Image (tube, rainbow, N blue to C red):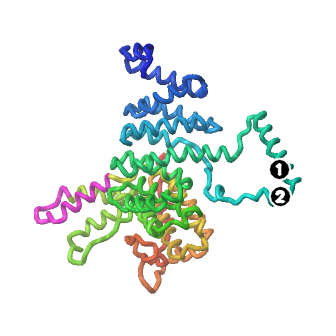
Amino acid sequence: MKSPRLKIYSKLDWNENEKLTAIRCVCQLLESHPDFNYSKELIEVLPSYLNITKTQVSSVIIKTLNNMFENDTDRDVTLTICRTIHRFCRSKSYKVGVSVIKALSCVSITEVERHEEEGKPKLDRRLRSRRERKESKMERKLQKEMAETQSLQTREKRLKMNTLVMNEVLFVFFKILKTTSDSELLSAIFKGLSKYAKFINTQYVDNLMSVLNEMVAKKSTSIVDGLHCVHTALSIISSSDASDVLTTDPTAFCNHLYTILGRIAGVGVSNITESDNAVSHLSSVIKAYDRSNTPAAQAVANLVQRSKITESSNKTTCSDEVTSVTASISNRISAYEMEHISDTLISCLNILLVRRKHEVSTNRILAFSKRLASAALAVSDPYCSSSLLIKLFHLLRLFPRCEILFDCDPEICSNYKPDVNDPELCFPASACLWDLLLLKSILIPW
């Protein structure tokens, strides 16, 4: 129920600049004094403005919330904000904008409560001597007095507050993940889940893993969203709590990561039969460079344009295929996106290969090393290419078996198959790191 004063101010005809100034004043007041008398009332107002599509308004609120989350040590204000946003999402039937999810993703938490800590058996009081009980009582009394006088917060209370905050955030994420089909909203959800993957409760792990497996297997899923899905799944698999209740095959996410790395490197899957070999030869060449940004890829793009101009009427069989692949060439991953996902990609490789170096097979190491070199060659941003090369050299030093990739002679069994998206079946021991030789002659535009 609005007070009479608020009703008077709500009838004023404010322009956009005045509204933005008022929001900035509210945000600065909350950031400077988060515990003053009317802070709860102002926090209740923010989610409705956060859901507005205007970028300038939402960016001001997100920046303020991020600063409040970082400066909040006892998590009381953070919990109040997260519960307010949760109530707002529930009132909107979880049909909210991307800015709301970005605000929830700003919460910085490093640890939460674990269930095994709650179930630890306590020592029976009757088994202690009278002297031990007296000393324990005096110790608890002294700790309580120190906490009251110095305003110290115990670790157990801090972990409990962190757990309550994460419950609010993850509940909103899971509810939106099951109810929405908006691509931008799903991208923000995947990014948030990738950040909070190690805090997910074990009872939701199996359902979440199946949802992530379905999402990353879709052809319409972008590289960025697929990589965030894989990073979330690998973070869950690497945690010891989820290993006991997990029923989803973790090998599938290894293959998904290998496929995404191939899409970044510009490797396409060849599904051409022998009867259509002569007709779709040009399309097979295009698919091999559909997401690359090298001079060879630009030459292929020019070849497609030239073929569309000079194609005759008797070659209509190949025209639709060339047009569809030409659209995929224009949909390459940009340097801005690559800059943001390179850290996530390297984190996935650390979880999958480095942390489990005693469990990884030789074929998997060789296959990922080869595709990592191809991705470093295809990436247009020199800084991202350098980070991928540093990771490649780390793998080469960590696994001496990778020295076979410097041998130009293929194995007797078969030749390397770059279009097979399974690291165990692509014969990676027959591959060669010729990408490093090409990287020496690449000119970096400054």
In the image, residue 315 sits, relative to residue 17, either above or below, namely below
Give SS at disc 2: loop
Is residue 386 in sight in this rendering? no
The amino acid type of the residue labelled 1 equals Ser
Residue at far front of view:
126
Q: Nearer the viewer, residue 205 or 315?
A: 205
Q: Is residue 164 left or right of residue 324?
A: right
Magenta stretch in the rendered image = 308-330
Q: In this view, does 12 lie to the left or right of 191?
A: left
Q: In this view, does 107 lie to the left or right of 7?
A: right
The spot of residue 356 in percent (x, y) is 59, 68
The spot of residue 376 in percent (x, y) is 48, 59
Q: How many marks?
A: 2
- What secondary structure do most residues of the magenta stretch adopt? helix
Distance between the alpha carbons at the discs numbered 1 and 2: 10 Å
What's the residue at 68%, 59% (across, down)? Answer: 120
Which residue is identified by label 1?
Answer: 136
The disc label shown at residue 128, or none: 2
Q: Which of marks 1 and 2 is nearer the N terminus?
A: 2
The disc label shown at residue 91, or none: none
Res. 70 image quadrant: top right
In the image, residue 60 sits, relative to residue 167, either above or below, namely above
Q: Do the residues labelled 1 and 2 touch (CB within 8 Å)?
A: yes
Binning the other alpha carbons within 10 Å of mark 1 as few (below 14), some (14 to 19) or many (20 upward) gives few
What's the residue at 51%, 39% (across, down)? Answer: 82
